[in-house]
Image (cartoon, grey):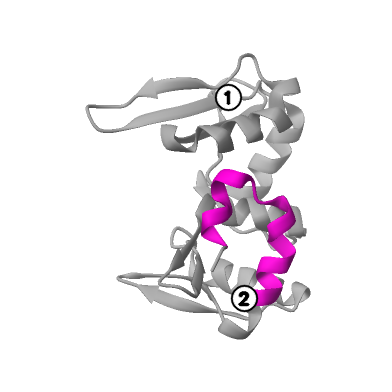
Amino acid sequence: MGDGYLRIVPGRQNAFLEMNHSFSQKEYVDWKYSIFQDITKSAPKKRVMDDVRTAYRFYTKQHPEITRLYRMFYKDGIKIIPRDIHITSLSLAVWFMDDGSRCRTSDVYLNTQQFDHEGQMRLVNMLKEFNLEARLNKDKTYTRIRFIKSSLAEFRRLVRPHIIPSMKYKIEV
């Protein structure tokens, strides 16, 4: 659900995963690479996008397990929320490090604007498995997930052990 991008090259059997973040998140990309390095061809590389943006990214090899995830998370080339999705505190933490934000001093969001309403509601309901209450919150034109204040302490307790040092700023109050 986060910043990874799954793709199948036309004419190929299996999908691969691309991890691409801004260069300022190098530590985070390196951490992700340490998890996937057994199925990658090379270490992350810096990529100058233009005069302003520089990315840091890596790709996995094409792999049957990644193909399974592709088929689960993409329908007609569009990223979706599968009906049978299950998360752990670790996957919630990675999702937050990828797509989470903290506004002001207490509002915590998961930026899910790219998903349809039904998929977002599936995610809101899934968070209840962790005793986390969240609502959809309008962000300009689209909606995203916003945690209810009474759930923030539990959310932080669940994800804190998995948050890498350079991302701690997202959860500290």
Task: Judge left or right: residue 50 versus residue 78.
Answer: left
Considering only vertical position in the picture, is 147 above or below 71?
below
Q: Provide residue 23's location: percent of width, then percent of height.
A: 43, 32
Q: Which of 91 and 34 is in front in this view?
A: 34
Considering only vertical position in the picture, is 32 above or below 120?
above
Task: Judge left or right: residue 104 versus residue 98.
Answer: left
- Dividing the picture into quadrants, the one containing residue 64 is top right
Q: Residue at x 31, y 27 (%)?
A: 49
Q: Which of 99 and 101 is in front in this view?
A: 101
Q: Provide residue 106's location: percent of width, then percent of height.
A: 49, 75
The residues bearing labels 1 and 2 have C-alpha atoms spaced at a distance of: 34 Å
- Look at label 1 and name its amino acid: Tyr
Q: Can residue 2 be seen in this view?
A: no
Q: Is residue 114 magenta?
A: no
- Look at label 2 and name its amino acid: Leu
The numbered mark at residue 137 is: none
Considering only vertical position in the picture, is 162 above or below 28?
below
Q: Provide residue 94's location: percent of width, then percent of height.
A: 64, 50
Residue farthest toward the bottom in the current orientation of the protein:
150
- Badge 1 density bin: few <14, some 14–19, many ≥20, Cα 10 Å: many
Query: For the magenta stretch, what is the residue range?
Result: 153-171
Q: What element carries label 2?
A: helix
The numbered mark at residue 152 is: 2
- Dividing the picture into quadrants, the one containing residue 172 is bottom right
Considering only vertical position in the picture, is 21 above or below 156?
above
The residue tagged 1 is 59
Q: Is mark 1 in CB contact (under 8 Å) with mark 2?
A: no
Q: Can residue 97 be seen in this view?
A: yes
Task: Judge left or right: residue 53 versus residue 133.
Answer: left
